[in-house]
């Protein structure tokens, strides 16, 4: 053996947990220092194999097996990976079986360490590139305005400089975290802005909806009387017909016309006529206060009233009450007191009929009230199936 192993010195204390020798013991006449050195070298090889990791074209299991073979070779001169038993198939020259193959061991460790170094350097380079690309892409995605782009570009340039100068990993990690934290703050700020913009937009939409509802309601109203207009009445009449067919609840329609309204206009002028219509509209709203009651100006001096869930008998009573209220009106115009009356035609809905047929029956009843002397209510009864046949 080389003189290194034969140095005269106080033998060191063996390790507390020496590596167990397998297959056979070291030579009995071997100096204690050399035995301890071989023990520790075998332990190093086995530890190296225990914590091996996959490399390019060399997996951890193969490294672990080779380290174990070299450890046994060092400890008990067992065959090593380059021994005749191991190298016969590869056509390698056999080594002396009585000597430890220190050159082969050194070459194995050198090659393995070089492969590990190349692998780690390559992976570290890839990691640096991935971190840089990730942060740059994340910043490009999140930046919305020029100020954000400037802030992100500055921190990404610093990170790129750190990558290009091969700074230690802890510095690279610190710079990457600084970039990520900045981008996170920008994302949080943008999220708050979006939330605020969303709330503002929601408020504007709600206001717009209110304005549209008000505009739609205004379009449904008669500008003079503020009752529903003819268009709104036609739509409501169709809806009520469909609803009645589903629910079967009784519904009545009243058509009202002011008696001798032309005389009012001719005698007192159109402003007086407008005042009469407005006063009559208020009287109708007062007489039919339910939310389901629908009062509309049908046209000119004619009004229409839809009473849902109201049988004919009740509608007759309500109609008579309305006529009495109209008779009691005292309308003052230019120091003149105007008294008016009205005629009403009533028809209960017939589920076998259409909306237009229902309206025509109410009109027929109104015509009879006019022809019968005015200031009265006439009812058009529902025809029985036999009468229709």
Image (cartoon, helix red, strand yellow):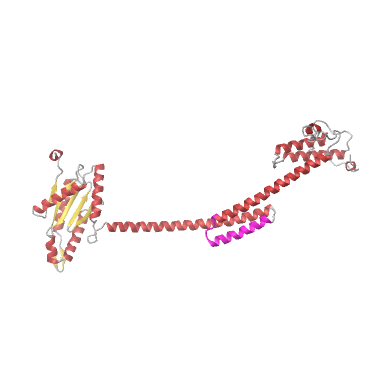
Magenta segment includes 148: yes
* Image position, residue 173 (x, y; %): 65, 53
Asked whether, in this view, residue 205 is left or right of residue 49, the answer is left
* Image position, residue 39 (x, y; %): 81, 38
Residue displayed at 21% across by 47% down: 355
Q: Quadrant of the N terminus?
A: top right
Identify the magenta region: 141-164
| Pick the front one: 163 or 197 | 163
| Pick the front one: 165 or 18 | 165
Say above or below: 383 vs 261.
above
| Pick the front one: 371 or 95 | 95
Q: Residue furthest front?
A: 91
The answer to whether any part of residue 15 appears in the image is no
Q: Residue furthest right?
A: 8
Say above or below: 157 vs 44.
below
Magenta: main secondary structure equals helix
Say above or below: 281 vs 238.
below
Asked whether, in this view, residue 180 is left or right of residue 216, the answer is right
Asked whether, in this view, residue 348 is left or right of residue 194, the answer is left
The answer to whether any part of residue 155 appears in the image is yes
Magenta segment includes 21: no
């Amino acid at each position: 053996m080389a003189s290194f192993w034969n140095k005269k010195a106080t033998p060191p204390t063996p390790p507390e947990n020496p590596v167990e020798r397998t297959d056979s013991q070291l030579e009995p006449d071997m100096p204690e220092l050399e035995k301890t050195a071989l023990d520790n070298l075998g332990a190093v090889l086995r530890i190296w194999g225990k914590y091996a990791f996959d490399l390019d074209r060399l997996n951890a299991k193969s490294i672990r097996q080779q380290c174990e073979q070299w450890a046994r070779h060092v400890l008990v001169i067992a065959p090593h990976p380059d021994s005749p038993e191991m190298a016969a198939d590869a056509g390698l020259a056999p080594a002396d079986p009585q000597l430890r193959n220190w050159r082969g061991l050194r070459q194995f460790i050198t090659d393995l360490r070089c492969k590990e170094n190349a692998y780690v350097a390559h992976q570290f380079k890839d990691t640096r590139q991935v971190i840089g690309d990730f942060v740059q892409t994340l910043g490009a995605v999140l930046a919305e305005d020029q100020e954000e782009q400037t802030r992100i570009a500055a921190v990404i340039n610093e990170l790129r400089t750190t990558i290009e100068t091969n700074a230690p990993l802890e510095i690279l990690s610190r710079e990457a975290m600084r970039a990520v934290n900045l981008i996170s703050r920008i994302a949080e700020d943008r999220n708050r802005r979006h939330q605020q913009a969303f709330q503002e937009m929601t408020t504007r939409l709600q206001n717009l909806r209110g304005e549209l509802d008000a505009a739609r309601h205004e379009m449904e109203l008669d500008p003079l009387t503020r009752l529903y207009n003819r268009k709104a009445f036609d739509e409501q009449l169709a809806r009520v017909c469909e609803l009645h067919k589903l629910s079967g609840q009784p519904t009545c329609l009243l058509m009202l016309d002011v008696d001798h309204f032309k005389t009012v206009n001719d005698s007192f002028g159109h402003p007086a006529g407008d005042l009469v219509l407005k006063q009559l509209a208020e009287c109708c709203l007062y007489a039919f206060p339910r939310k389901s009651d629908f009062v509309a100006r049908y046209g000119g001096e004619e009004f229409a009233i839809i009473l849902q869930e109201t049988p004919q008998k009740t509608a007759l009573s309500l109609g008579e009450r309305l006529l009495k209220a109209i008779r009691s009106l005292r309308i003052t115009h230019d120091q003149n007191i105007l008294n008016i009356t009205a005629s009403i035609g009533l028809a209960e809905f017939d589920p076998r009929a259409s909306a237009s047929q229902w309206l025509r029956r109410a009109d027929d009843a109104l015509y009879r009230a006019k022809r019968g002397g005015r200031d009265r209510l006439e009812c058009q009864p529902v025809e029985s199936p036999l009468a229709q046949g």
